[in-house]
Structure formats: C-alpha cells, structure tokens
Image: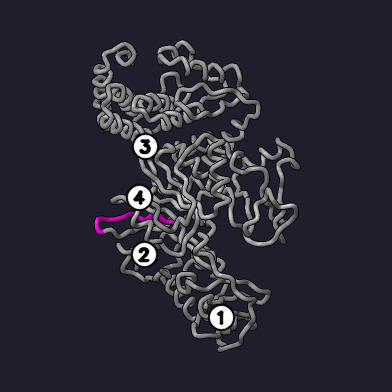
Amino acid sequence: MLPYYYGPLEGAVVLGREARLLSRGRQTPTAAFAAAAEARALACQGNAAAAEAAIAAAQRMYEHCHHGDQDDAFAFPERRLNLYLSGAYTALGRSSQARNAQEQALALYPARTGIDPALLQLRGEPEWTVRLVSLLHHPTARLCRRRPTAMRRRTLVTTDTTALRRSLADEIHAANPTLAPQWRTALAAVPREVFTGTAFYRNTGTDWEPLHRAAVGEEEWLRLVHTDRTLVTQVDGVDAAAATGPVTGSPTSSATLPSLVVRTLQVAGLRGQEKALEVGTGTGYSTAILCHRLGEDRVVSVEYDPGLAASAATHLKEARYAPTLVTGDGLQQHPEADNCDAVVATCAVRYIPRSWMWQLADHGSITTTISGWMLASGLIRLTLDDTGAAHGRFTADEISYMLARPHERPPSPPFLRQNGETRPASLDPALLEQWAGRFVAQLAAPSAELMHTSTGPVLRDVATGSQAWAEQDGSGWQVHQHGPLRLWDRVEEALQTWQEAGAPPLTAFGMTVSDTAEEQVVWLESPEGPRWHLPV
C-alpha cells in the first residue's frame, strides 16, 4: 500500500505480485487483496492489459474463497475489494465501472462503519472521506446517484430505501446461499421503486386490479415494492398507471421478482468482464442489475414494445444508468449487440432464434427459458463450441418467463369438444400437473396448448385444430381424439419414455442447437438418448 501512495508505483506492483506468489495458488481474501492492489498500481502506470488481467484475477479469487468475518479490522471484505477496483477503473478511464464499484462498496458499509476516518485520508481521495462520514452521521440517509464522473459527490435525499433494499437482498441470499456476492450487492444497490412507476396490478382471481402509489401511501408502497415477487405492470397492453379500474386478460409486462432476475444472471455465468445482450428490457430493473455488475458500457438491451422501451429508458435515466437501449424485436439481429459474449433473455422462447447465434463471440453463451403453449419451461445456458453449435443442460429451476411476443400463441376460437376416436388412457393425466411431465408433453406436441375443464385436461393443436380431451370413467380415464394429429398418443409416448427413465427432473434434459440453428433438439440423459425437435 505504501508504495502506491508515496511511490514508486513499481514497488506496489512488485509487492502485490510477491504477495500473490506467497499464497501458493490458494484462493484466499489475501490473494485477492494482492491482485486488486496490483491492478490499481498497474492502472496508474497506464498498463491497461496487465491491470485488466489483475482485476479479473482478484474477482475470480474472491468469488471462490471463504470470506471470513467481514467486520474484522484486518479482513479484506467485499466492500474493500470494490474500493480498490474503483481506483483501478478510474485510472483506466472507465468511469461507469468505477462508479458501479463505489456504489457496491457503499451498499455494503453498515449504517455506522467502525472504520477510522484517518485511514480514509491515506486514500488520497477526500471524496471517500466525505461520503463515508456522511454515512457515519446520517445513518438513515441514502446517497443519491449522479452520473457524470465516478468521484462526483452524492447528495443526501430524505426518502430512504437502503434498509429495504438490503433486507430484500439478505432475504434472497438466505434462500439461495450459492448466490454470488456481486448479485447480492447489486440487489442492495439498485432502487427497485424507480422501476415500478406509480402503479402495478394485483390479481384478484377473476381480473387484474390496478394498485396506485398515491392510493396506498408511500410507506406501504415501498414495502410492497421491496418484496420478492413479480409486479405485473401491464395487462394486454394496458399499463397499470393508465387503468381506471379492473381489467381482464394476460400480463404482457412485469417487474420480475428480484430472486428470479439474479438467479437467471447467475446461471448465465457472468463474471464482470462480458458484453451482454439482454432480450426484454421490460421495466428496466434487470437491465439496471446487469449494468451494476458489468458496467453500463457493456450492456445492450432490446425491448419489443415501444411504450415499455420509452418507460424503461426513463427509469434507467432516473436511476443513473445509461446502457445501450434498442427498441425492436429482440429475436432479430441488431448491430449494437454484435460480437457479444452472452445473450440473456428475460422472456421465454419456443426455440433459439438464429440471430442470437450469429451475434455471439466465439464460445459465447445463451441463457434463456425454453417454453411453449402449454406454458411449461426450462432454464438453460447454451455455450458455443468450436464448430458454432451450441450445447447445454437444463437447470433444476422451476421458473417461467412470459413468452416473447413473436412466439406467443396466436388467437384461437372458443373450444368446442369433438368426440372423435375414444380409448382408455394408458397414463394418468395428473402427470401433466408435474413440472417435468408437462415439459415432456410440450416437447411431444409443441404446437398444442393445454387447457383445463371441469371434467379433465384438454389438448388443442393451434396449427391443425386437432384436439384431445380426457374424462374420468369409473376408476380410469377415457381419452377422445379428433383431427389429423393424435395428440394424446404423442404425449403418452413421450411421458412413457420419461417414466421408463425414472421420471427424472429437468436436470436430466439437455439441448443441442446446430451451427445454422435449423436443427434444435432437446434430449434426455445424453445427446444419443431420446430426443425431441423444437418447432424451428
């Protein structure tokens, strides 16, 4: 540290490297500390490539080590790591990432930090002293974000959501201890209330009732916003803020529950250095989380709905994030996202769009949920291999996103039963209520929708009008099939295959996408096992 402050910088670099050598390759906070100190000194020397490598090493080691007591006076907690990285980013001229690192650090300092302000003077940056002293003397205040430079002083505001955000982040981390600390920090830093606007919908069971911020009061509103649940902000294109009474229909936009946002981003394997394409800006909340982790200059987000895109841009500006925003079809190619390292979709798709494959850099990844008109879904991360094909396995997560607008089921007429051919069912239709069972049924009949009536389940093929419906007959079930496709036969055959394999969860399934994306198959156990083609 002393050579960094008093010179020569070469001494700081040498000592940092010697400290890393003494760690003998062990992943420890001390080794991460040494790499971060080395990165900061290298950046000040103007050695950008070496500084970037040291930053990556510090982040990698810290993510994989045991952090110990974060309040120990001689510990190297995450907040201090971010302070060092902010110095490195500032010297590299990357003000956006410097600001993000600072905000991550400040979000982790307790309301009354025990750090001696005199130590902060050694930093040689009075701004940090001003900001942390503000925390010491204003424990209920939050620091307002401003964008122009990484070291600009934040001003105090009276409406404080810091405690609510931290509580939400702690709750999500407690439920998922494997969550990387960087995502926990982002949850604690990004103001979710900015992205929910002035209203959201509440499901009454029969319709959607708008709940307006002014009607419930500020304190209750902030409490509702800072819960781990999805807040529906638009139903069939009608924004909650514009609704004067209950509406019917299906949700078309929402502020996704925060735990799902960070879980998806963790599955994407983002480590802080990637350029990412987000498909589905929505309210902008997940975009802000991405910006906080990667830096706004590394995030491109595409939104299909022009109204939502404009609203998200306003929200992001208010929260002081400035990613590249595109209004258009996220399933098409956009030059702003070319050569990205990762595609992350906050909407579901029936198959992988070719454009996502084309826009990826070598060995890039695609993280999305594969879904369909039975509304079964599986979360997967696909990685490009040397041939340009993509492979991956589904996670165990039982989660769902709204289908991308171009992949939504087209309008269909009211259902009218047709008797057709009747036979006893070989399998219990209750299998369709199991998450993996319905996923398998959807693979077998990809253009069919699943409905439920008072007598039993109904399958209807959107493309051909074929239908199959079941009704109880004594102790068993009778199945009626009508039309050119024998939907129940297809579904039963797939479910039988799944049961013979032991009825495994989604983790037993994987997916392969050819280099042209013209062939996309989901397989069971291995690529050589049972397989089903997606409706490309």
| Chain part drawn in magenta | 379-387
Please say if the residues under marks 3 and 2 sit with CB atoms less than 8 Å apart.
no
Looking at the picture, tell me which residue is in the foreground, 324 or 523: 324
Amino acid under label 2? Glu
Which amino acid lies under the numbered mark 3 shown in the image of this protein?
Answer: His
Disc 3 residue crowd, few under 14, some 14–19, many 20+, Cα 10 Å: some
- Vertical position of residue 68 compared to residue 177: above or below: above
Q: Where does label 3 land, which residue?
A: 64
Residue 195 x %, y %: 59, 42
| Picture disc at residue 525 | 2
Counting residues from the start of the chain, the first of labels 4 and 2 encountered is 4
- Lower sequence index among marks 3 and 2: 3
Cα separation between marks 4 and 2: 33 Å
- For numbered disc 2, what is the local secondary structure? loop
Q: Which mark is residue 338?
A: 4
Tell me the residue at 39%/66% (across/down).
522
Cα separation, mark 1 vs mark 3, equals 52 Å
Where disc 3 sits, the SS reads loop
Q: Which mark is residue 370?
A: none
Residue located beneath label 1 in the image = 467
Q: Nearer the viewer, mark 1 or mark 4?
A: 4
Q: Amino acid at mark 4?
A: Asp
- Left or right: 510 with respect to 255? left
- Sequence-first tag of 4 and 3: 3
At 36% from the left edge and 28% from the top edge, which residue is drawn? 93
Give the answer, above or below, for where 419 lies relative to 536: below
Look at the image and tell me in which quarter the N terminus lies: top left
Q: Are marks 1 and 4 in contact (CB under 8 Å)?
A: no
Q: Residue furthest bottom?
A: 421
